Amino acid sequence: MRIDRRALLGLLPSSLAVGLVACGSEDGDGSDDGTGDAAVNRRPPASGLRDDRHLVVADQRVMALVDGGVGVWVLATGEHERTIGAEVTGGLSRSAGSGRLAVGSTKGKILVLDESKGDVVATLTGHEAVEGAIEALCLTPDGTMLASAGGDGTVRLWSVADGTSDVLDVEGTMPRALALTPDGGHLAVAGLDAPVQVVSLDDLSVRTIKESPPQGVSLAVDPQGTTLVTTTADPPSPGKVVRVETSSWTTTDLVSDVSPVALAVSPDGSTLAVGDSGADALILVPLSGGDRVTVPGDETPRGIAWSDDGQLLVTAGADTGIVVRKAATGEELRRIDVA
């Protein structure tokens, strides 16, 4: 498959960040129903969310995976607007320009959906049907291409039109997070057993950021594409958030002594939101320097997304469900009833 970089241009910040996707028993019991599709048996969060790691916020609405498809709620009121029907397991991405959604489905399949009609535009097959079959997804704004990380250890670039894909030559067997740079030039890959790797979409060559730690469970890119941030988490030891400057691919520690599991950069690139599992807290970190704000909570925010205007921050947890917050302070405004 030939990679068309023009299809990757103009990515919105909300399309870039992909939250934690844990592996093993944390997300499921590992059982199989005899169909070879263990991913179907993942234990859903108690909140009613099918997957509390992936949120999409756009047009003053929040989307998340629930039993039966993709739930859509109004941010201002918390009202449930509709559910886009699909058989989903994990992974969610929205194409800003095409009105398409991508979701992980059963037996390693990926479904591309028409957001307004709910129709299946494409079914992509290639990832093996293992537990956690689809770990992360990044759909381009025009909806023509998709990057995916699978529980089978592969990272793929797909052509939505014909369903073909390239398997990228990245290290490690447990990729967990993806991020596309705004210029469409590079795809970053983080995983549990390898440093962060950056794939050039011109020639599919791979650069390994050797200074970045393994155990990468989340990635985010600022809107300018100058800063890539990633996490390391190796419980019970404290983890950290690492900044990678894309001009030189050098790294610096941004936040230490935390157990970060989710990241999201604000639309203006000024603030990084971090979900800290060690303290069950949301941390707001000014990327240009300054004091960080720690917002204690009932549990760890495992999914994080900003509103388009940067005024609201939305988090998700296994028990609390979806929480809408003031972006400046992290103050809770309302909880959305997912059930």
Image (tube, rainbow, N blue to C red):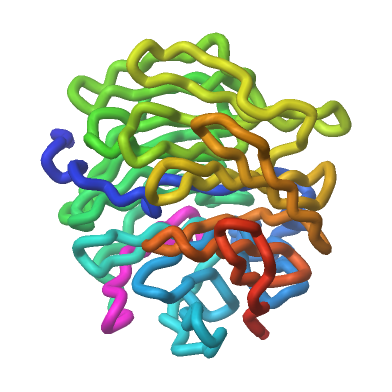
Q: Position of residue 236 (x, y in %)?
A: 88, 32
For residue 186, what is the image quadrant? top left
Considering only vertical position in the picture, is 259 above or below 59?
A: above
Residue at 61% x, 33% y: name it: 290
Q: Position of residue 34 (x, y in %)?
A: 67, 63
Q: Position of residue 303 (x, y in %)?
A: 60, 56
Q: Residue furthest right?
A: 236
Q: Position of residue 306 (x, y in %)?
A: 48, 58
Relative horizontal placement of residue 258, taking residue 223 as reference (left or right):
right
Q: Does the magenta run of residues contain 326? A: no
For residue 184, what is the image quadrant? top left
Residue at 39% x, 14% y: name it: 207
Residue at 43% x, 75% y: name it: 61
Looking at the picture, tell me which residue is in the foreground, 59 or 123: 59
Part of the protein shown in magenta = 103-118
Residue at 63% x, 46% y: name it: 284
Relative horizontal placement of residue 253, taking residue 10 as reference (left or right):
right
Residue 226 showing in the rendered view: yes
- Quadrant location of the N terminus in the rendered image: top left
Residue 102 showing in the rendered view: no
Considering only vertical position in the picture, is 251 above or below 44?
A: above
Relative horizontal placement of residue 153, taking residue 199 as reference (left or right):
right
Looking at the picture, tell me which residue is in the foreground, 173 or 328: 328
- Quadrant location of the C terminus in the rendered image: bottom right
Considering only vertical position in the picture, is 107 above or below 268?
A: below
